[in-house]
Image (cartoon, rainbow, N blue to C red):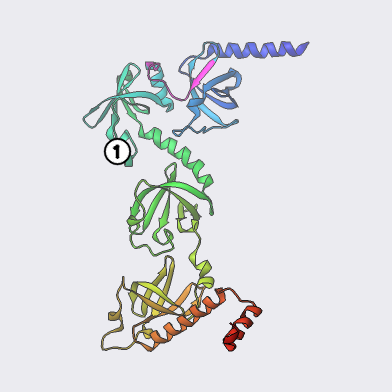
Amino acid sequence: MTEPTEDFAAMFEASVQAKRIERGQVLDGRIVAIGPEVAFVDVGGKGEATIAIDELKDAEGNLEIAIGDSIQAMVVSTSGGLTLSRRLARGAATDRQLEDAFRTGLPVEGKVERAVKGGYEVRIGRQRGFCPISQMDMPRNQGAAHEGRVYEFRIVEYKDGGRNLVVSRRAVLEEQQRASAAAVRQSIVPGAVLTGRVASVRDFGAFVDLGGGVQGLLHVSEIGWSRVSDPAQVLKQGEEITVKVLRVDDGKEKISLGLKQLTADPWSRVGETYQVGQVRTGRVTRVAGFGAFVELEPGIEALAPASTFAPSGKSWSSQIAPGTTGSFEILSIDAEKKRIGVALVTEGSARGTAAREAQDVREYGEREQDAPAEGFGSLADKLRGALNPRDK
């Protein structure tokens, strides 16, 4: 019979402690249960409190806490139990609560009423605050329309009993971004396939926002199996793309991404589709001192050495220029090292004649192999008919 007495004593003590708590007081607590609309917070000897689930979600609507996590929140009601808030609603914020919010760093809700010189006028409770233009948004979003919107702000200056308030929305956004970034980084491991948005396009590649302000570099060499000379022709700022994480350098906080790795490497089937002696159409992509690079198909580039070009009164490089399309004979294949050697086939040259004859022989052999085989009896009948025309 002692247990009910102990339970009643504990409940009575918690009730007494709760009555001593005032609105505006900031408490430390631990999440003990999460329901569909509220979470329950253990605030120690002061009993148990509740907090709305919406206050525990990030900007994307994802729950950012779990059972066992510690939080700091302000008491907004003691009627019928303790109700906590991690932000002050703009209509309920009193002068005392605004001062407490300033001292504890608790976000407050405010409505952006109008733009003024150097920033915006914000209504918070019965007070008006000033938000400098640089503190209204993240740098990359400056210039967005804000008038008439309700945001969370942090009070960075509190003077004259609250009559002079300076607030910052950027401070709240940066804190949310840091919390989100920590969660995002846990999912960024080599081999992971993620969806991101192109933040900016440069000559050397593109920066991709993976969420929470975390960005990775998609180098120009990793965009496609074909050579990409201008990333801006393939990617657009703001475009949503799927990428693969190639490398993660935690020390330097660098993330390397790939796009071409999500499609099959064309070199994986070179041994099946290319043979020495074949003549294929190719396009010259660039010319170097030792030869010309030729694209045989997207992602498959071959080298035509300078020595393979027929001698003439002019320099060999003058015979061919980037963008030129022609016929090239395959001289060598090293699929493992991704190297193919080719030679330009010119009209009337010995190489061209030999290559065309070899190609004709191969095509003829393929046609013979594909032709349906005839039975021995049918062939014998045809021979007898040719030898004995009178039997027809």
| Mark 1: amino acid | Gln
**Image: magenta residue range:** 82-94
- Give the x, y percent position of residue 71: 53, 28
- Give the x, y percent position of residue 46: 58, 18
Q: Residue at (46%, 52%) from the top-left corner? A: 243
- Give the x, y percent position of residue 146: 30, 30
Q: Quadrant location of residue 114?
A: top left
Whether residue 349 is in magenta: the answer is no
Pick the front one: 32 or 141: 141
User: Residue lying farthest right?
Assistant: 1
User: Residue lying farthest left?
Assistant: 117
For the N terminus, give its image quadrant: top right
- Give the x, y percent position of residue 166: 31, 27
Pick the front one: 238 or 254: 238
- Residue under label 1, please give it: 142
Q: Quadrant location of residue 287?
A: bottom left
179, above or below 94, in the image: below
